[in-house]
Amino acid sequence: MTKSTTILRRQLGRQLRELRVASGLPIVEAARRIERGAGTLQRLEKGENPRIRLLDVEALTKLYDAPERLEGLLELARRAREGEGEGGAWWHEYGDVVPDAFALLLDLETIASTLTMYRPELLPGLFQTAAYTKALDAAYFRTATQEELDERVRVRRNRQRIITRRYDPVVAHLLLEETVIRRVIGGPRVMAEQLRYLADQPSNVTVQVIPFEARYPLGTATGPFTLLDFDEGTGEPPTVYVEGYGTSTYYERRGLVDRYRSAFDQLRAVALSPADTKRLLRTASREYRA
């Protein structure tokens, strides 16, 4: 699968950081020795600098005494600079409604092997119907034009291709609080359609609802999050994405990722089974239609 420059920059930065840490050099000292600012090197290591200088990559590799890595790192840097995959990044045509922090999530979703998602209040975009999306966005983006709202719907529909594509669709496990299916977004007809759609997801998607009467596990008030896992060949580590009010945060530190994974397992333990969840969703859908 073609990788976007965002992913390539992240992989280059991660490898350079690993070499620096192994060398024992602080980032300030490493930057000083190649006559660059510490902020510049930090952005390079985080994959946030679109202007990659091959001379910097070469100098850092030499500084870290890793000549055997030079050819591979330079090739990775060239691919990131030349924009491999940018033409295939479908979301680029929606740049006006896709901020940079969210664009990274779209890139990561595309190459992820599994998505583990917990939502306590609202459905994630990957599983929203067009009507649900329109109702939600109209309330959230109050000054948006109809054209902008339609564009946001198209973004979500395009995202959903990772679920429905024929070749190697992503495996998703979605855990919802019952609040999600009881809170009315857009009116009863919209909710009826949405819940039926959720109940009819393909076999690579597992949906479970935590009912109101379930015992709530202590220490698991995480808020909404998505845990992305990747096949080894992608070069990406497991990553947790947390979307807040106006913010997006990505966590890669193993200990923290493991805590989110453990929290999901604890929440799943008190959820309805997938079969019981489907029955609940279909029953609720019929009730909204009544």
Image (cartoon, rainbow, N blue to C red):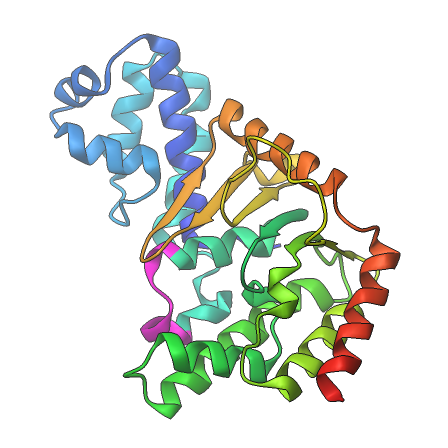
Which residue: 72% across, 46% down? 214
Q: Position of residue 208 (x, y in %)?
A: 75, 54
Q: Residue furthest bottom?
A: 146
Which residue: 37% across, 26% down? 16
Q: Which residues are magenta?
A: 93-101
Which residue: 30% across, 44% down? 48
Q: Residue furthest top?
A: 24
Left or right placement of residue 137 versus residue 170 in this view: left
Q: Residue 249 colored magenta?
A: no
Residue 216 seen in render: yes
Left or right placement of residue 265 versus residue 202 in this view: left
Left or right placement of residue 185 versus residue 181 in this view: left
Q: Please count the marks in the image.
A: 0
Q: Residue 100 colored magenta?
A: yes
Q: Position of residue 56 (x, y in %)?
A: 24, 31
- Above or below 22: residue 69: below
Residue 127 seen in render: no
- Which quarter of the rendered picture does the N terminus lie within? bottom right
Q: Nearer the viewer, residue 124 or 63?
A: 124
Please, what is the dominant secondary structure of the magenta stretch? helix
Q: Nearer the viewer, residue 272 or 54?
A: 272
Q: Position of residue 237 (x, y in %)?
A: 55, 34
Which residue: 38% across, 52% down? 244
Left or right placement of residue 273 versus residue 49 in this view: right
Q: Nearer the viewer, residue 20 or 244?
A: 244
Q: Position of residue 7 (x, y in %)?
A: 46, 47
- Above or below 272: residue 47: above
Question: Which quarter of the picture shows residue 46?
Answer: top left
